[in-house]
Amino acid sequence: MDTSGRVFELWVYLSTSPLLWLTVTIGAYIAAQRLAAWSGFNPIVNPVLIAVGLVVAILAATGTSYSTYFDGAQFVHFALGPATVALAVPLYRNRTLIRQNFVPVIVALFAGSLTAIVCATGVAILLGAPDSVAISLAPKSATAGIAVGISQQLGGDPALTALLVIFTGVLGAIIVTPLMNLLRIKNYAARGFAAGLTSHGIGTARAFQVNEIAGTFSGLAMALNGILTSAIAAIVLGLLL
Amino acid sequence: MEGLFVILVCQLIGEIVVRTLDLSMPAPALGIVLLLAYLWLADKRTGSEDGAAHTRVSGVADTLLKNLGVLFVPLGVGVMQNYRLIYDYAGTIVIAVVVSTVVTLMVTVGAFLLVSRVFGAKGAGDGH
């Protein structure tokens, strides 16, 4: 057999093996992280978005189906569940902070969580989007592991929700600092809490760049909003749709 | 290893409860509550603040959370399967996300500040 025949045979074997696509997923993310670091961690250069784009381009170029890709990528995907459960640890670590700011935290949590669901779903319904799109939008301020689960259970499109979660995260991370400066808000606990509630992990990463207190409150808001959104999304959607 | 086991058990119990009671809530969300309860009860029992239970779990938890970004990639790639949905409703989706992101940021920060101020003012008056 000639060399190109051998290479082809090897490709046919590797392109359907989980190992290749697991490696590609992690490799794409590392490359995207380097790019983000190189940009000075500009929120527009989001590593998740870049890694998704890279993988989609590779799959399209090689004619690989999503189900073949997912056979490998599922090992990374699986860890999303335990990683979501792990949010309890920073929450527990900062319990004194919650106790000290209990009333503002709880009020802002309920106000923000409801606003996020009602606003996104309401705008979509007003503009004539089908229910599946409106449902996919509803949990988008919650962290991905929870948002995708909600979308799946309520009849949305989990993959669309995943992208909307990232989009909301990136957008919030970009606008939070200029918006808060414009509103002349100097309370970094309040600023961080809004960032984490609206833009989950991506907002929290941004908040930690700006201010340590903002980052801690942002992480707190992310975990609390994940729990609350999962508890109320079905009820709110029932009233809206 | 023990930390990972505790996290997985919390998720597993969450999964069992959600499926048995037919709750419309993702199992990991319930898992967060269970892990919180575990940490709180375990530290309470040993009488130590941030004691053994927290140390056991925090290593694995911090590693998972530090690499949260890469865990979204397989889901995000899934969008290529139904790009038509995004293509058909791109305008609606962008408007809904932009409006709700700006409004949610403002409502959350507004609620937090308002309540802090009301309680701050009351506290200052009482403290006299």
Image (cartoon, coloured by chain):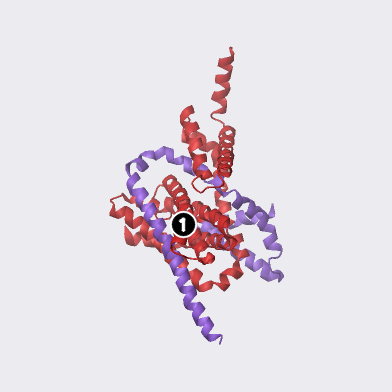
Viewer-proximal residue among B110 and A202: B110
Q: Which residue does the image show at 44% across and 45% down from the upper left?
A: A159
For the residue labelled by badge 1, is the local secondary structure a helix, a strand or a loop?
helix
Any part of residue B15 in sight: no
Q: Is residue A155 above or below residue B55?
A: above
Q: Which residue is disc 1 drawn over?
A: A178
Q: Is residue A14 above or below residue A109?
A: above
Any part of residue A96 in sight: yes
Circle 1 Cα neighbour tier, 10 Å, few/some/many (<14 / 14–19 / ≥20) = few
**Rendered location of residue A105, percent (x, y):** 50, 69
**Rendered location of residue A209, percent (x, y):** 57, 55
* Chain in purple on the image: B
- Pick the quarter of the image with the C terminus of chain A: bottom left
Chain A as rendered: colour: red
Give the mark count. 1
Furthest residue toward top? A1
Q: Amino acid at mark 1?
A: Pro
Q: Is residue B11 above or below residue A92?
A: above
Quadrant in the rendering for residue B55: bottom right
Q: Which chain does the numbered disc 1 sit on? A: A
Viewer-proximal residue among B122 and A226: B122
**Rendered location of residue B66, percent (x, y):** 61, 51
**Rendered location of residue A13, percent (x, y):** 56, 25
- Pick the quarter of the image with the N terminus of chain A: top right
Q: Which residue does the image show at 33% across and 57% down from the upper left?
A: A122
